């Protein structure tokens, strides 16, 4: 009974593709000139002027969820001229709408807002984006859009080469002067606000010389032919719809017991945070892939990993790598092994199987663990839960209580590494997808201070948050789980996994799809 309708649907889809082709319609967006930088109200003083004249950049590592969300709200609420944002994921949830509500307020007070979201984000926000785009100060674009928005399976079937490349960038810039980049998308689980799952991540706030290149990169992506305006893709919103959205946000704020006051509290906290942890100045470089990478047409110097190598060079003393999705491949494994043989100390942290939110990635990572360990590389895997002894900022602000107070499902999402006193923090994972398919961004900081802070933090927290992998006398991998009381539990296979899960991982690892992990 169902065969005939299904056949008709398939035939209709094929006919539609034949008639319309597989290419996107012509982009109707007008190219925009670069914005003017307005830095005067962000940081001032003789010391700032001196540091800026030396080509330095101020930075503050944001290694906790509260400071990360507060810094973004701070940039939005203090901006006077422009706010530019580009993100891979922007969820239709409380954090996503909190950010959109504050951006709408900024647009209402005359700030020009430009928001670029990768179309892999999905369609749940379409109605809201359409409403916001009706504001004269609010422009929204979708990057590398699907041709068939409601039937995306058709794009996967006929446009896989095009849609398999995504804009993985995470960046917000206020007034062209101060920015935040890192690993966090805009979603509850990235800011300790999810009911059942949290990502552990890292961002960095920066101000100074490096921001200019961040502006250039955003401008390049914004004007790219793959960035389509929301009105062209979704149609035009109207002022009535925008007014209803504004009323909804205002009503929601009232229902949440004067959320505005709590946001102001968050801002005060980030200001205090900045004072308690003074911003350091260092030579820094904002690096990024060109949007040409999405078309497979980027030159070597337009790729982020070549920029990393050019700036950071090869490790001579040590390499510390934190990568949520770690697939070194045979080539990368040989590279790391050769470094270790040349007396470079290497320490790597990635997700354990149960902590990895993309299980198939683990299948291709686990193939290389033995070789890494056999050659003296220290390897750690993030535990699939976190111990929480106090309420999160989100619980305090909203009055909610997140379940599973003792153990909460968690996953590593951070992407940063340090090489001999240089530190990279951004969106780049050590895997084929980041290297070859998706566009990525990040900040390289030439700072012994930041490097020592990261090393000290890893020394302190790794025993609590991660299993240490070693080889036993028989040359087999074991997992060491250190408990608070000093005891160590030894596992002879991936902790808390079943035989079937381990079999499935092994079977998947033989598939010829490592190139897209």
Image (tube, helix red, strand yellow):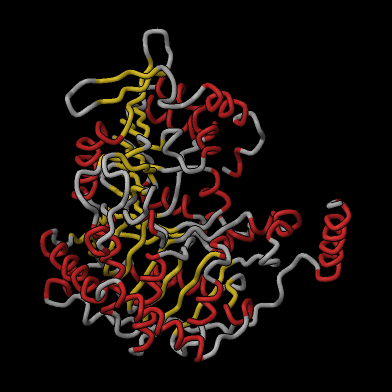
Who is closer to the viewer here, 260 or 447? 260
Is 139 placed above or below 438 here? below
Residue 283 appearing in the image: no
Q: Please provide percent x and percent y for residue 17.
A: 81, 65
* Quadrant of residue 504 within the rendered picture: top right
Residue at image point 41% right, 38% down = 355
For this orientation, the residue located farthest to the front is 1
Is 473 placed above or below 462 here? above
Q: Please provide percent x and percent y for residue 263.
A: 24, 72
Who is closer to the viewer here, 303 or 429? 429
Who is closer to the viewer here, 59 or 241? 241
Image side of residue 168 versus residue 48, left or right:
right
Q: In which quarter of the image is the C terminus?
A: top right
Residue 333 appearing in the image: yes
Residue at image point 50% right, 91% down = 239
Instruction: Count all numbered tags in the image, as a single digit.
Output: 0
* Quadrant of residue 260 within the rendered picture: bottom left
Image side of residue 85 versus residue 484, left or right:
right
Residue at image point 34% right, 32% down = 346
Q: Please provide percent x and percent y for residue 491.
A: 37, 19
Who is closer to the viewer here, 277 or 361? 361
Is 15 placed above or below 455 here? below
Q: Please provide percent x and percent y for residue 230.
A: 57, 78
Is 100 placed above or below 325 here? below
* Quadrant of residue 250 within the rendered picture: bottom left
């Amino acid at each position: 009974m169902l065969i005939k309708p299904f056949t008709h649907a398939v035939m209709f889809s094929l006919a539609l593709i034949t008639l319309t082709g597989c290419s996107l319609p012509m982009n109707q967006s007008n190219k925009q000139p670069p914005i003017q930088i307005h830095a005067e109200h962000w940081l001032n003083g003789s010391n700032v002027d001196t540091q800026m004249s030396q080509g330095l950049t101020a930075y503050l590592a944001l290694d906790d969820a509260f400071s990360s969300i507060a810094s973004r709200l701070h940039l939005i609420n203090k901006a006077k001229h422009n706010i530019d944002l580009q993100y891979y994921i922007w969820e239709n949830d409380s954090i996503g709408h909190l950010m959109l509500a504050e951006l709408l307020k900024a647009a209402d007070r005359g700030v020009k807002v430009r928001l670029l979201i990768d179309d892999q984000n999905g369609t749940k926000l379409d109605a809201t984006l359409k409403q916001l785009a009706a504001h004269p100060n609010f422009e929204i674009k979708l990057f590398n859009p699907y041709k068939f928005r409601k039937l995306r399976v058709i794009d996967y079937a006929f446009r896989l080469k095009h849609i398999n490349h995504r804009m993985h960038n995470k960046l917000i810039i206020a007034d062209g002067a101060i920015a935040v980049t890192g690993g966090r998308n805009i979603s509850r689980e990235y800011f300790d606000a999810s009911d059942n799952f949290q990502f552990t991540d890292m961002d960095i706030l920066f101000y100074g010389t490096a921001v200019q290149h961040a502006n250039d990169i955003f401008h390049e992506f914004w004007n790219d032919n793959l960035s389509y305006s929301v009105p062209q893709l979704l149609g035009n919103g109207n002022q009535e719809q925008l007014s209803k959205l504004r009323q909804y946000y205002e009503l929601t704020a009232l229902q949440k017991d004067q959320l505005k006051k709590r946001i102001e509290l968050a801002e005060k906290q980030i200001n205090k945070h900045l004072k308690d942890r003074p911003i350091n100045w260092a030579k820094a470089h904002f690096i990024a892939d060109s949007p040409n990478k999405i078309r497979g047409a980027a030159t070597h110097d337009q790729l982020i990993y070549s920029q990393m190598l050019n700036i950071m060079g090869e490790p001579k003393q040590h390499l510390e790598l934190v990568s949520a999705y770690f697939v070194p491949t045979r080539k990368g494994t040989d590279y790391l092994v050769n470094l270790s043989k040349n007396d470079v100390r290497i320490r790597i942290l990635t997700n354990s199987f149960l902590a990895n939110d993309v299980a198939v990635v683990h299948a291709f990572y686990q193939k290389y663990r033995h070789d890494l360990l056999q050659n003296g590389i220290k390897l750690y895997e993030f535990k699939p839960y976190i111990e929480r002894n106090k309420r999160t900022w989100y619980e305090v602000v909203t009055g909610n209580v997140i379940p599973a107070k003792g153990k909460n499902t968690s996953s590593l999402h951070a992407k940063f590494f340090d090489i001999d006193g240089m530190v990279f923090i951004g969106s780049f994972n050590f895997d084929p997808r980041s290297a070859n398919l998706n566009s990525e961004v990040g900040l390289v900081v030439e700072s012994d201070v930041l490097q020592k802070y990261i090393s000290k933090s890893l020394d302190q927290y790794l025993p609590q948050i991660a299993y240490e992998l070693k080889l036993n006398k028989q040359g087999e991998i074991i997992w060491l789980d250190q408990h608070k009381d000093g005891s160590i539990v030894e596992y002879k296979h991936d902790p808390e996994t079943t035989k079937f899960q381990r079999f499935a991982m092994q079977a998947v690892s033989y598939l010829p799809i490592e190139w897209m992990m």
